[in-house]
Image: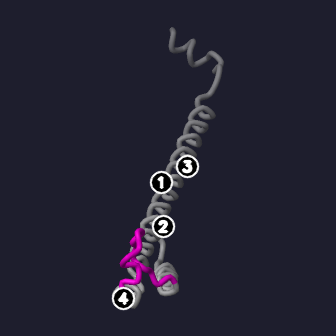
Amino acid sequence: MALKKLLIGKSRGSLIPLSFSFFIFAMLLSFISINVVSAYAVKRELTNLGEAAVNKSAQSINLLAYYAELNRYSSSKHVPLDCPAANQKFSHLISQASVA
């Protein structure tokens, strides 16, 4: 009797729009999270690439000034860098790199 009443009675609503909206919402959240993760991975890769290029270019010292010990009696001792060579090496390393 209850089954006959249920089959004959009018339906109050459908679950199809609710299910479809939940599916769209879940797909949207997964799309956003995948994009955020990939952007973070590329940012981390670029940071590592830049730091590696800076470290490599910082090793370009001015050998003549270094071995002549031009700042031997100076109170602020520093390693003399060859800035044009460091800039060229940095630019070369950055231009060679490929980011996925």
The residue that mark 4 highlights is: 68
Disc number lying in front (1 or 3): 1
Residue at coordinates 45% horizontally, 59% vertically from top-left? 41
Q: Earlier in the sequence, mark 4 or mark 3?
A: 3
How far, Cα to Cα, is label 2 from label 4?
38 Å
Can you name the residue that lies furthest to the bottom here?
Answer: 64
Disc number lying in front (2 or 4): 4
How far, Cα to Cα, is label 1 from label 4?
51 Å
- What secondary structure is found at the residue carrying circle 2? helix
Residue at coordinates 47% horizontally, 82% vertically from top-left? 86
Residue at coordinates 47% horizontally, 77% vertically from top-left? 98
- What secondary structure is found at the residue carrying circle 3? helix
- Residue 32 marker: 3
Left/right of residue 62 with respect to residue 4 in the rendered view: left
Disc number lying in front (3 or 2): 2
Q: Is residue 89 magenta?
A: no
How far, Cα to Cα, is label 1 from label 2?
14 Å
Range covered by the magenta-colored residues: 69-83
Q: Earlier in the sequence, mark 1 or mark 4?
A: 1
Disc number lying in front (4 or 3): 4
Where is residue 96 shown, x and y percent of the image?
47, 83
The residue that mark 2 highlights is: 46
* Magenta stretch prevailing secondary structure: loop
The residue that mark 1 highlights is: 37
Where is residue 30 shown, x and y percent of the image?
51, 47
Q: Amino acid at mark 4?
A: Ala
Confirm or deny contact between disc 3 and disc 2 (CB under 8 A): no
Q: Amino acid at mark 3?
A: Ile
How far, Cα to Cα, is label 4 from label 3?
58 Å
Decide which of 62, 96 is in the foreground and name it: 62
